[in-house]
Image: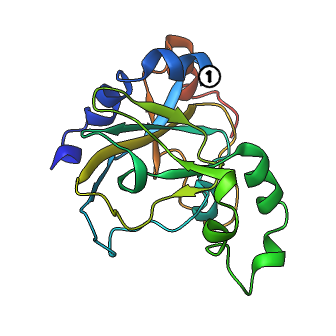
Amino acid sequence: EINSDETFSSEYLYLGYEAITKMVGTELAGNKKVNFSIQFPNDIISKLPIHSDTFSGESEFQINLWVPLTDAYDTNSMFIFTPTFSRNILGNLEKYELSGIEHFLDENKSDYKFLDVPFGKALVFTPTCLHGNITNETNDTRISFNCRYKNLFSPYNQSEGNEKKLGSFYKPIRPKAATLIGMNSETKQK
């Protein structure tokens, strides 16, 4: 229902606007839809396995604005691996093809942490770092939103058949006048 409002993802952006524009600029593209997540205590179905958003074809040049509507801590929060660890694993994914990367959670506890984000705060992070969640072993339900933003002109994943492009997955958010003129020009290069 929240995503039936065409302006919701643009309005959501303002929760982290200053940080986001400092990182990626002011001409933005964002998810067409804001994601909504509920993680109940002891709910094994709401687990989100370890991943990088690039696994599903999203741009390496995006950032994620994650806003919990409840206190997020310990296992009701999400975990994230350090950038260094993530780069090492992502650079050697073929090595883990048979065993999967899920086993790293037990083997590398010092390389990731559960994020402590209290209600009223937000987190901006690079979803190129491995992240996810596990079964919520706390007594508190976590409710959160997340949306990805990138510079309108930074690269999109160019994999053939990938739908994670401008127009299908991302939409322009407040492009500048020159960009609008250029995008609508009949003389633009094809």
Splitting the image into 4 quarters, where does residue 103 fall? bottom right
Residue drawn at x 64%, y 59% is 109
Mark 1 secondary-structure assignment: helix
Residue drawn at x 54%, y 18% is 21
Q: In this view, does 87 lie above or below 70?
A: below
Q: Label 1: how many residues lie within 10 Å, few (<14), some (14-19) or many (20+)?
A: some
Residue drawn at x 40%, y 35% is 117
Visible in this render: residue 101? Answer: yes
Q: Position of residue 127 (x, y in %)?
A: 59, 46
**Residue type at tag 1:** Met
In this rendering, position of residue 120 left or right of residue 190: left
Q: Is residue 7 above or below residue 21?
A: below
Q: Position of residue 114 (x, y in %)?
A: 50, 49
Visible in this render: residue 26? Answer: no
Residue drawn at x 28%, y 71% is 43
Q: Position of residue 12 (x, y in %)?
A: 32, 30
Q: Which of 136 and 175 is in front in this view?
A: 136
Tell me, what colour scheme is on the image?
rainbow
Q: Is residue 189 above or below residue 127?
A: above
Residue assigned mark 1: 23
What is the quadrant of the C terminus in the image?
top right
In this rendering, position of residue 22 left or right of residue 77: right
In this rendering, position of residue 51 left or right of residue 98: left
